[in-house]
Amino acid sequence: MFKFEELCELIRLVGSTEVASFEIEHQGGRLRIDGKAPVTMVNPTLSAVPATAQAIPLTTESLSTVSADGAAAGSPEDAGVDEDVHYVVSPIVGTFYRAPNPDADPYIKVGDVVDSGKTLCIVEAMKLMNEIESDISGTIVKVLPGNAEPVEFGERLFAIRLS
């Protein structure tokens, strides 16, 4: 099988290139490393697994706003949407929860004014509770998924009117 150092080097190499996927069979073992996603994706709800083990930032600043049907915010499909509305999207795949526990009040409600950095919800992924924070200040216009519903990477969670 592979030595730890060999695995680390393979992961570094795949992560530093534009390779989408790498698979090798060696001494009866099989290894697959998924690298960067190709530029054009057939299904925008799928994303590549990072090649290195890194902490995933749970802010939405670096994420493009993509709806569940794959239309990017600001595209012709969104022509009728208010331009002052910003969408907070899920940075991970998981289960959406509006409150920290079933007996607690939701973090926010429609009409609440939020500041940048305010916790909006939790997305549970692999038994880890990830707090999702607002990346802008504004007023909550709409909460899109229902409580305890599964959400995808890039799925819209909240509509916030900029203040």
Image (cartoon, helix red, strand yellow):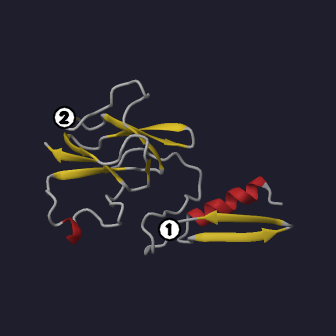
Q: Residue at x 25, y 35 (%)?
A: 109
Viewer-proximal residue among 70 and 163 = 70
Q: Is residue 158 above or below residue 37?
A: above
Q: Which residue is mark 2?
A: 113
Residue 108 location, quadrant: top left
In the image, what residue type sits under mark 2? Val
Q: Which mark is residue 86?
A: none
Q: Residue at x 41, y 24 (%)?
A: 103
Viewer-proximal residue among 147 and 67 = 147
Q: Is residue 61 above or below residue 102?
A: below
Task: Tell me the distance, in whole angstroms, between the alpha carbons under discs 2 and 1.
Answer: 36 Å
- Element assignment for label 2: strand
Q: Residues within 10 Å of mark 1 (few under 14, many from 20)?
A: some
Q: Which residue is mark 1?
A: 37
Viewer-proximal residue among 62 and 84 = 84
In the image, what residue type sits under mark 1? Ala
Q: Residue at x 48, y 72 (%)?
A: 38
- Element assignment for label 1: loop
Q: Position of residue 119 (x, y in %)?
A: 34, 34
Residue 49 location, quadrant: bottom right
Q: Position of residue 53 (x, y in %)?
A: 59, 50
Q: Is residue 19 above or below residue 58?
A: below
* Viewport quadrant of the C terminus: top left
Q: Position of residue 12 (x, y in %)?
A: 62, 60
